């Protein structure tokens, strides 16, 4: 089936171990997708939504114990433990292989083994990388067609280049005790068993494009980041691209396809990516970004005409929904979509409020990026797009202002490294707990954070037109727990401030923790936000920040001697300047 001997041998080896009934090499065609869907409708893996209002759209209900990424079952298996760092769970590669071989033995009996060749990034981009996922899940094979450039063209590239990431996946028995997601960066290999869910199972996404790619990127001198990429065009036609890292379920998809508020006639958003960015230093000394993905695996709850009309529109056809609720007439439903009451909850039970939310809080849609109205052709450019600003953001009910500008690259790396955010339903575990999530990469950096921060600093040193670095927070709350900032489309007002700063057209208020907007520089025309709220959103409390800097100090020291001294020095500088502010 392929002229690549390594691939042919690997498929044979895996088949011998897993004992599938059949082997199918995916070509990525529409006919193949239709056959996969027909099979899943037959087996009950997919349910057809109302074909009149939701053509070619389906609902998948995953196992109720398998609804989010499982970070405690995810491992980075490097030969030296320290290379994985305190930010990852580690297992010795030999032990991990022994464990996984035992679990994979006979795992595909009675099932079809799908060989899924895929390319992360435009097929003709020098920055793109290929992989092959072997899976026994038709849902995974079909989703990979939407999320990546999957099929024959990817296989052709693999045969030309000879290299690919090997991803082996089986649903296993879906038992959480027999669920593991193992990464072998030195072998460019991934093995995942026991989960059919998103980032655990669609191996091109978090496993390849972030954990394995971040490891490769460090060796090869680029960055693999948990970032959206978007272009913002002003009414004069000036177009700037930005990349933004927010932790899981903290607003990347929404920002990537933002709809400008009414007052922003003539502004245009160009969506390039909503989850992952691969960043390279160009010959021109600028930072260039490609989106390795081709689709969106987005959070459903909270998505409505009011918050994200682009998403609602793109979900009207050719979409697979996972773990959403259903209305009487078989339309998908989730909390925040409308005032309707659904008929069935995400587990297929008659909806009863006592059972909790109707849609799982981490229910998702899988859709081709081409269905998004703001999708841009620039996403297909082999060179990527040049980045003017990098934004870090998280869910912080207090402390972090609406927007903050780093003084320089080194200070920006400190802002990224000290990011924290409330946990969300994207991963199993308690939600709403503030945890450090440096660069939104805590669950995804495939190597030691100390080395990662050094790599960020080294990358900055190679840029002679480094993007400005910013921190934003759409999630500040008042004493009653209500958001202080309206968010969504209105976030463009903050992005405009950022672009004005990048172009040097406005000033800022310099503080020890970074530069804040001057009074009146965030355009609030037509917005109903009280003066008091704006003041809270755009000022800093020195004592709270002194405490924060102490916590950041302990956090950085927790990573030991691999943390670059420059990052400690930068933090010390901020702390010292804060002490100089005196008591407040
Ligand atoms: P992953 O796909 O998990 O990486 O998440 P993401 O960063 O793409 O998050 P997404 O845009 O899907 O948003 C997650 C949740 O945050 C949704 O429920 C959104 O409605 C909500 N959200 C997004 N942007 C805003 C905002 O500006 N303000 C508020 N209050 N909520 C927002
Ligand atoms: C995330 O959790 O950051 C996601 C969803 O984007 S998943 O693909 O499951 O990782
Ligand atoms: Mn994500």
Image (tube, rainbow, N blue to C red):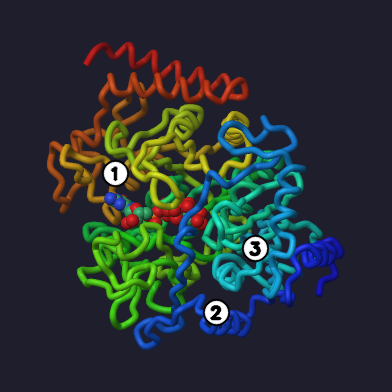
Q: Residue at x 12, y 42 (%)?
A: 530
Query: Dot 1, crowdedness within 10 Å: few (<14), some or many (≥20)?
Result: many
CB atoms of marks 3 and 1 within 8 Å: no
**Residue located beneath label 3 in the image:** 170
Which label lies toward us, 2 or 1? 2
Query: Dot 3, crowdedness within 10 Å: few (<14), some or many (≥20)?
Result: many
Which disc, if any, is residue 40? Answer: 2
- Mark 3 and ligand 2: say if the CB distance to the nearest ligand atom is below 8 Å: no
Q: Residue at x 29, y 35 (%)?
A: 401
- Mark 1 and ligand 1: say if the CB distance to the nearest ligand atom is below 8 Å: yes
Q: Is residue 529 left or right of residue 512?
A: left
Above or below residue 509? Residue 489 is: below
Which disc, if any, is residue 252? Answer: none
**Residue located beneath label 1 in the image:** 475
Q: Position of residue 207 (x, y in %)?
A: 61, 52
In 3D space, how far apart are the residues under numbered discs 2 and 1 (Cα atoms)?
Answer: 39 Å
Which quadrant, please, contains the C terminus?
A: top left
Q: Position of residue 188 (x, y in %)?
A: 73, 50
In the structure shown, which secondary structural element does the residue marked by tag 1 occupy?
loop
Q: Is residue 551 left or right of residue 523?
A: right
In the structure shown, which secondary structural element does the residue marked by tag 2 occupy?
helix
Above or below residue 386? Residue 546 is: above
The image quadrant of residue 502 is: top left
């Amino acid at each position: 089936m392929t002229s690549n001997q390594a691939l042919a041998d690997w498929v044979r080896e895996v088949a011998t171990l897993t004992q599938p009934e059949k082997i199918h090499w995916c070509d990525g065609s529409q006919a193949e997708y239709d056959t996969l869907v027909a099979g899943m409708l037959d087996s009950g893996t997919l349910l057809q939504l109302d074909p009149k209002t939701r053509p070619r759209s389906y609902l998948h209900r995953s196992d109720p114990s398998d609804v989010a990424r499982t970070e405690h079952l995810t491992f980075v298996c490097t030969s030296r433990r320290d290379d994985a760092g305190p930010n990852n769970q580690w297992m010795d590669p030999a032990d991990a292989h022994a464990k996984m071989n035992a679990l994979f033995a006979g795992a595909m009996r009675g099932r079809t083994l799908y060989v899924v060749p895929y390319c992360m990034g435009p097929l003709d981009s020098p920055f793109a990388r290929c992989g092959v996922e072997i899976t026994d899940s038709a849902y995974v094979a079909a989703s990979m067609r939407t999320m990546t450039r999957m099929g024959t063209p990817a296989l052709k590239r693999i045969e030309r280049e000879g290299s690919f990431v090997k991803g082996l996946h089986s649903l296993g028995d879906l038992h959480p005790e027999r669920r593991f997601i193992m990464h072998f960066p030195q072998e460019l290999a991934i093995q995942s068993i026991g989960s059919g869910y998103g980032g655990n199972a669609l191996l091109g996404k978090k496993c390849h494009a972030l954990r394995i790619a971040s490891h490769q990127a460090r060796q090869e001198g680029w960055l693999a980041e948990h970032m959206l990429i978007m272009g913002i065009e002003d009414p004069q036609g000036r177009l700037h691209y930005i990349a933004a890292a927010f932790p899981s379920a903290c607003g990347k998809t929404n920002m990537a396809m933002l709809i400008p508020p009414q007052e922003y006639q003539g502004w245009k958003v160009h969506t390039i990516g909503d989850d992952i960015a691969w960043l390279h230093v160009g010959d021109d000394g600028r930072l260039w970004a490609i989106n390795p993905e081709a689709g969106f695996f987005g959070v459903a709850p909270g998505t409505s005409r009011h918050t994200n009309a682009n998403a609602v529109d793109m979900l009207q056809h050719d979409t697979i929904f996972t773990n959403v609720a259903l209305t009487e007439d078989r339309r998908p439903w989730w909390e925040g979509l409308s005032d309707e009451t659904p008929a069935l909850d995400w587990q297929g039970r008659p909806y009863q409020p006592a059972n909790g939310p109707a849609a799982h809080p981490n229910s998702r849609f899988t859709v081709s990026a081409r269905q998004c109205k703001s999708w841009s052709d620039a996403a297909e450019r082999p060179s990527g797009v040049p980045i003017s600003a990098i934004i870090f953001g998280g869910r912080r009910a207090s402390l972090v202002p609406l927007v903050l500008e780093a003084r320089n690259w080194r200070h920006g790396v400190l802002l990224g490294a000290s990011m924290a955010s409330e946990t969300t339903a994207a991963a199993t575990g308690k939600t709403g707990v503030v945890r450090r999530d440096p660069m939104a990469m805590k669950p995804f950096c495939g190597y030691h954070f100390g080395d990662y921060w050094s790599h960020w600093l080294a990358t900055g040193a190679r840029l002679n037109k480094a993007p400005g670095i910013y921190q934003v927070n759409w999630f500040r709350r008042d004493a009653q727990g209500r958001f202080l900032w309206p968010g969504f489309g209105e976030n463009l007002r903050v992005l405009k401030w950022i672009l004005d700063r990048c172009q040097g057209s406005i000033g800022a208020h310099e503080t020890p923790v970074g530069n804040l907007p001057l009074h009146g520089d965030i355009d609030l025309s037509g917005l109903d936000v009280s003066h008091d709220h704006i003041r809270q959103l755009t000022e800093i409390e020195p004592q709270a920040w002194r405490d924060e800097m102490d916590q950041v100090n302990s956090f950085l020291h927790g990573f030991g001697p691999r943390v670059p001294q420059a990052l400690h020095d930068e933090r010390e500088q901020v702390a010292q300047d804060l002490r100089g502010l005196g008591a407040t």
